[in-house]
Each structure stands twice: as C-alpha cells, then as structure tokens.
Image (cartoon, rainbow, N blue to C red):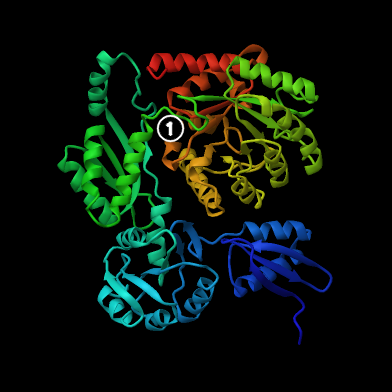
Amino acid sequence: ADADVVATENGMRSDVESEVAITGPDWSLETALTLLGGHQATNAGVAATLARQVAAVDERTIAEGLRQATWPGRFELVDRDPTVVLDGSHNPGAAATLSDLLGRYEYEDLHVVFAAMSDKAYDEMIASLPAVERAFVTRPQLDRAESVDSLADAFKGHAATVNRVPSVAEAVDRAIRRAEEDDFVLVTGSLYAVAEARDRWTRQVVPKDRVPPRATNRSEETEGASEEARGVEPSVFETFLRHDQAETVAERFEAVGGTCVRSSAGTPEKLDRVVLSGSATELRSLAGHLDDAGLGLAHVATQLRARLDGSSTTSGPFGVDGTAVMGILNVTPDSFHDGGEYDALDAAVERAEEMVAAGADVVDVGGESTRPGADPVPVETEIDRVVPVVEELSSLDVPVSVDTRKAAVADAALDAGADVVNDVSGLSDPEMRFVVADHDAGLVLMHSLSAPVDPDRSAAYDDVVEDVRTELAETVLHAERAGVDRERILVDPGCGFGKSTAESMELVDRLGEFRALGCPVMLGHSQKSMFAGVSGDGDDRLPPTLAATAMAAERAADVVRVHDVAENAAVVRTVAATTGSD
C-alpha cells in the first residue's frame, strides 16, 4: 500500500544541509536538515507526523523545528580547510550510508581516523569506504576496543598508507596536519572514538583569574620590568582532559615548577577536571613541552598559548584598543528604557550622531523590543523600522550593528550597509547563520532561553557560568559549520535572559572565563532589572550600570553594550588609564 506520508530528500542545500520535502494526505512542508541521507529524511517525516498528532502546530513551526535538530557526531562537519567530519557509524549498513554521503563532496584525498569495538564487523565497514589515501587506526580508552594492529591488518588493500596511533586525539591531530586544504578528514567506526575526537572542538581552556594580568603601555623605561613582572605573576586555568592526557600534563607542568590539581569528581565520564596554577613563564614552558608529548596535547598547547596571548592583547573586534562601547539605538515604540524616543528617522539619526560624538565605537540599531511581555514584531514592520536608519547611518565613521533575531531582517539590514548582526536569541532562526556567512558579516551570539524575555521561563544551572559557556560553545560551532569565521563571532552571556539577579551578577564577575571560547566577549547589562535591588530610591539604574561597566572593562571585555554612552565611555577610559592599557 502507498504510504500516507512521504518524505523525500532533494539534494544538498549547502555543505551542511539537505533539502527535504514531506507530504501528507492534506498537508505538506519543505525544510532543510543537518542530518543527511534518505533515512534521516524518513525520520523527519515520522517526527512531523507525530508532532501534528500530539500538538496543534502548523507546518512552518514543524519545518523550523526539524531544521534546528542536530546530532553531535552524526556526519558532523566540524572544520574546513581541510574538511573534517565526525561520524559515529559503527556497523556495515551505516558505513555504506556514510560512503554514499561522502560521494556528495568534492575533495582530493581522503584521510580516515578509524577505531572500532572488537565485536563489530569492522572489516566490512572498512571495505565499504571509498578510496583512502591514509588511514590512522586508533583505539579509544575502552577495554573492548579493537587493537590498532588488527585494524591495521583490516585496512591492507584499502588504504595507500596505514598509520598506527594508539591515542584517538593524537590520530586526529596527525590526520589534520597531514591533510592538505582540499582534502577530507573523516573520523569514524566508533561512537567512543568520535566522542574522544570531538574534545578537540569542545574543550575549553578557561582563565579563572577574575582580572587578567595588566597589558601596560607605560614608559619605555619600565617596559622591560613590566614584561618581567607579568612573567612571574601567577595565573590559573582550568580545562577537562582524558585521564592519560591529564596525567601527562600534570607530570610536565610540575617538572617546570607549576601546580596541577586533578579531579574526576562530578566531571563528565572519562574526563578529569584539570586546574593549572603558575606564572606565565611556567605556563608557556608547559605549552612547549606539550608540543611533542603526543596524545593530542599539541592542540591543548595551542589553546593554552591563545589564552595566555589573549589576556594581554589590546586590539578589539572593532579596531579599538581595549573595550569598545556599543551605543544602543532603539527605533521601537516599546523598548523598556527608551521606547518611542527615537522611532522617527530624524530623531534616530540625530541620536546616533550624538552617541558617536560621546564615544560610541559602534551603533546597535534595534527594531523589536525583547523586554518581558513585548509583542513580537512582524518581519516587514521590523525591516521598515531598521533599514532606513541603517542606510542613513552608513555615513558614520563607525560600524553599524542590527539587533534582530530574524534572518530576513538581518539580510535586509546587511544589504543596507550594516556590518554586524546582534542576535539575542542565539540563532533561534535556523537561516540566520547562513545569512551572516553569505554577507561575511560579524555576529553577536547571546545566550538566552527566550526572546522576548519570558519571566516564567528559567533554567536550573549547576554553575551558571560553566553551563552558559558550554551552551554558547555549541552555538559558536553551529555558526562555524555554516561558514561564519570564529574571528567574526562575539559572545554575550545574556544577563537577565533566563537568569536570576544573582546569576546575572555572577556572569559579570566571571566574565573573563568566556574568553575560553576563543571569541571576543560582549556584555549587555545596561539599565536591566538585575540592578533593581541595588539602584536605590527612584530605581536609578545608571550608577550600577556604570559599576558593572567598570568591572567588565577591568575583566578585559571587548565590548560593552549601553544606553548612556558618554557616562559609560568615561568609565571605560578611566579603567584603561588605571590599568595602564590606555
């Protein structure tokens, strides 16, 4: 009998999505899936049918939900130049599907990092792969994993070269280093191996110092002494490593005089929490010793150097030394602080010019309020609000950002001359990341549970900073897969968006930890309700806003997003002067 619901995959929409059409008896929808292949299209059809049966949802909502579905480690593109894909296929049928998917991509040579459990038909899996230039057979940290020697034997006749590498992380590192930009690196054969390989893209080296070492620009007479002082000033970093990696790091760091504390209590399975405490000199020495330590630790060394260098750099994302000031320009009738004041074009342009004169390094134009209880604004209305303003601001000598969660609005604003998209929803619109990539624009990713703010929606955080940082890391990877360069991404922890006052204050205090994401950090805190309890009589939130701006600047925030530009810019300049970074 003919199926009541038919799901069809209709080719690739991009290198990370395929187009899918789902047709029912009296309904149909089209969407795109990051889960590739005909089987995943069928799964999408089943999910769409169930959604219609259990809830009153329309086809557009279902299509957007399907497009947002992700599955880490299931043909997951994690890097480019060379292309790197993680796929947990661990049986012959899945491996055959994987081989078909590889046929959709153009590449020169295929490099495969392969591991398998001893009870799997890995010889059949290997035989189903296309021509392999170089195989890196490896073994995850699991007793029932097959030996590298057995896997190497199975690859005979199926790969031009076979390398035995006992560590998954090291095998991935070697494969990427051996591959050319137009090659393809595939990690497959075992879900356990894919999990260990994925550490490379999810691991964070977190600076735990509230205030980073000062980057001084004082007189030349003291420059040498300042460099020497920074070399011995202690710093603390935290990361998560596999057990063997953690043991090696501890041995190498203690050998150069540093202190390493390890614990597996309360950590994800098979990972150790590793805390490093030492001077910059000792930490750089550790990085040097890790370069040739194996176990994939060369990449950890690269991350550690980036954090050490990042704590002393002064060039921000908008070409500003130190902390840039983003001036908020709400062209809305209902924003919580200044709604209705600048919704006329002339008033908006005049306000932007005033902010730039007062010290704004970038102007952020918003056409939809995200305050609690705000009504959503139709796309056409939001475009009509922001595009004329963006066009008029093109003559300003500062970048222009558009504050929107809708891809269509972002596209129109970028066409009109905007440079950056400030997405307070963290890519809730699945098309947003592609729009930003197509325009080669900047992107601010904010952590939020809902936008506009839903006062009844909250989350139970174990550690609000660690949890928010982990979720933002996945959002950054999601944007990168669409082609947005990490260098063009800023992260905002989202004070007040699904966080209590205490949690928002914690985000401000530990703002420097977000540097672990390898992106510039922005704080959006201006005039928010998080200050209601400390604002005193009359609920004047400017003084606590300025205090938080000072804390953010001292913690080396790259951008502060504020309403009162002159006052906040003065605070930023004062912090720069007192820390010697002016």
Q: Identify which residue is drawn at 30% across, 56% down.
A: 296
The foreground one among 428 and 371 is 428
Q: Residues within 10 Å of mark 1 (few under 14, many from 20)?
A: many
The answer to whether residue 264 is visible is no
Query: Residue lying farthest right?
Result: 26
Amino acid type, label 1: Gly
Name the secondary structure under disc 1.
helix
Q: Identify which residue is drawn at 64% across, 48% down.
A: 435
The foreground one among 393 and 149 is 393
**Residue topped by disc 1:** 512
Query: Residue lying farthest left?
Result: 255
Q: Identify which residue is drawn at 33% across, 61% down.
A: 178
Q: Is residue 556 above or below residue 40?
A: above
Quadrant into which the C terminus falls: top left
Picture quadrant where residue 305 is located: top left
The foreground one among 295 and 177 is 177
Q: Is residue 27 above or below residue 565?
A: below
Residue 212, percent across and down? Answer: 37, 28
Residue 396, percent across and down? Answer: 65, 24
The foreground one among 273 and 289 is 289
Q: Identify which residue is drawn at 42% across, 36% down.
A: 513
Quadrant into which the N terminus falls: bottom right
Query: Residue lying farthest bottom?
Result: 1
Q: Is residue 538 above or below residue 281?
A: above
Q: Is residue 514 above or below residue 474?
A: above
Residue 400, percent across and down? Answer: 63, 31
The answer to whether residue 215 is visible is yes
Residue 201, percent across and down? Answer: 42, 52
